Structure formats: structure tokens, C-alpha cells
Image (spheres, rainbow, N blue to C red):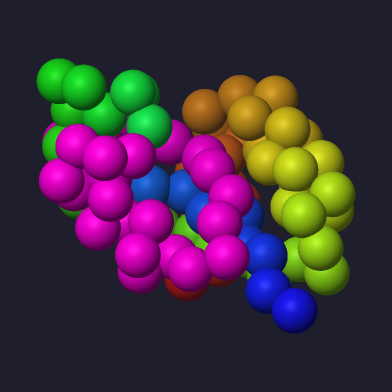
Amino acid sequence: MAEWQVYIIRCNDDSLYTGITTNLERRFDQHLTGKGAKYFNGRKPLEIVYREHCADRGQASRREAAIKSLSRREKLQLIASFR
């Protein structure tokens, strides 16, 4: 059974991208090579700044939506609590 994760990537324009995956390293490589989300057209992913393990895809999707609804300040606080 796949282990789902929700993650946040910091981009070269200092924006934050949130997504879900079962293989974070593979997904980051996809974003780097232009095979991931369209969000990275014109942006370069720099680093994974947050990751959170989830029980299943449904939980990961709900958590992703919750994180995406946060303000930038709240996302930065979440990232700071992770480090």
C-alpha cells in the first residue's frame, strides 16, 4: 500500500507550491524536468520545505486543500514548525 504525503516546495520566485504524492523524490524530479505540474512553467522548484505523511489519498487530498487555503504567513509558520 502506497504511503501518501503532502508537501510544499519553495520556488525560485519565492512562491510556495503544495501537492501530494506517494514518492516525493520522484515527484520533485518531475517538477524539475517540466513533467510535473503546470505551475512550474516559468518557475523553478528549489527545495522541499515541508512534508507530512498521510494515511491515504483522501486524507492527503484534504490536507492539501487545507494547506492551500492558508495565507502565505500561515504557510510560512507551518514550514517553520517543521524545521
Left of 42 or right of it: where is 64? right
Residue 73: x %, y % from top left: 54, 32
Q: Residue at x 52, y 28 (%)?
A: 72
Left of 18 or right of it: where is 44? left
Please indicate, yes or no, whether residue 67 appears anywhere in the rendered image. Answer: yes
Left of 15 or right of it: where is 50? right
Residue 57: x %, y % from top left: 77, 54
| Residue segment shown in magenta | 10-36
Q: Nearer the viewer, residue 45 or 30?
A: 30
Q: Residue at x 84, y 49 (%)?
A: 58
Q: Furthest residue to the bottom?
A: 1
Left of 65 or right of it: where is 20? left
Q: Residue at x 52, y 40 (%)?
A: 18
In the figure, residue 24 lies in which quadrant? bottom left
Residue 61 vertical position relative to residue 40 in the rendered view, above or below:
below
In the figure, residue 70 lies in which quadrant? top right
Based on the picture, tell me whether residue 9 belongs to the magenta stretch. Answer: no
Q: Quadrant of the N terminus?
A: bottom right
Residue 15 vertical position relative to residue 19 in the rendered view, above or below:
above
Based on the picture, tell me whether residue 14 belongs to the magenta stretch. Answer: yes
